[in-house]
Image (cartoon, rainbow, N blue to C red):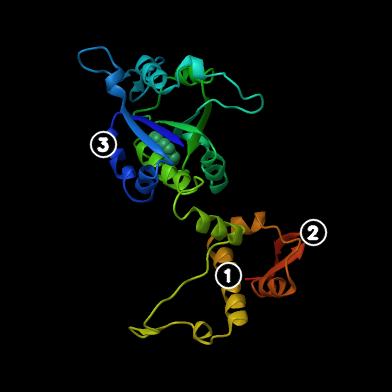
Amino acid sequence: MRIDVVSIFPEYLEPLKLSLIGKARQDGLLSLDVHDLRDFTTDRHRTVDDTPYGGGAGMVMKPEPWAQALESVLPPEAERGAAETAGDSRPVLIVPSPAGARFTQAMAYELAEEEHLVFACGRYEGIDERVLDWSRERFDVRPVSLGDYVLNGGEVAVMAMVEAIGRLVPGVVGNAESLIEESHSDGLLEYPVYTKPSSWREHEVPEVLLSGNHGKIARWRRHQQFERTAERRPDLLEEFDATALPGADREAFAQLGYDVVDGRLRRRPEAG
Ligand code: 5OB
């Protein structure tokens, strides 16, 4: 996979070159290049922003430096449009924005299959909208949000997305494990984990984990997943597919005040 990032703060992205992604880069599975948007300006002051048409607060990123930067990361014309009968072979342009679609693990899996990802980090109030229109003729453009909160720019969002996607790239160390982990998680939060010592500052490891009874441990962990998800992320239980839920799991959910109705979990009205 090839990754290009365009930013006015290229040094923010330096940590990405370390750790897991760093190893994948060494192994030749992944290339990561960070480009300074200001290198694509032509004026003395290397200007990347200007006041918004229509008025209002803040500054807007000018279109021309963006077009120059994005053109510089596109493969040569000759290599574009060649071959590929089905599907979209164009690079994916990810534009981090609070106005984008939510970034999810499912999206990370999809993007991990792509040949070429380009991230465009906006600052100020955003990028001139025409850059996105122009880009749609050359890229598969995806405005993406990390969540419903405000950041100063796209850089921190790109750090999170590249880490989430990079670890899923076929062949990256730990990839096999992460796939197994994922296949077992089925939309529930993880169970709590403990290590030695079994008694620590008057806090004990749950006895069941010391019992050596692996069936009982598996059931306890499953119950913990249900309990945590009901407590912290009840929204995930609304999406949970309960069609083939084993009797023991149904019982665990019943204890937590959830019944299975038409393959979905339904909270019992009288439950606390
Ligand atoms: N807030 N996701 C949530 C985001 C965001 C802000 C961004 C980019 C992605 O840039 C200002």
From this view, report whether residue 188 is shown above or below residue 93: below
The residue depicted at 57 percent of the width and 18 percent of the height is 81
At label 1, which amino acid type do we have? Answer: Glu
Give the residue at mark 2. Answer: 262
- Quadrant where the C terminus sits is bottom right
Residue type beneath disc 3: Glu
The disc labelled 2 sits on which kind of residue? Answer: Asp
* Mark in front: 1 vs 3: 3
Q: Earlier in the sequence, mark 1 or mark 3?
A: 3
Question: For the point 53% across and 20% down, which residue is it?
Answer: 136
Is residue 116 at least partly visible in the picture? yes
Q: Nearer the viewer, residue 215 or 225?
A: 215
- Residue 49 falls in which quadrant of the image? top left
Locate ligand 1 by image quadrant: top left
- Please give the residue where the numbered disc 3 appears in the rendered image: 11
Q: Residue at x 70, y 75 (%)?
A: 248
Residue furthest out toward the top: 43
Distance from disc 1 to disc 3, alpha carbons, whole Å, reads 42 Å
User: Is residue 200 found left or right of 232 in the rendered image?
Assistant: left
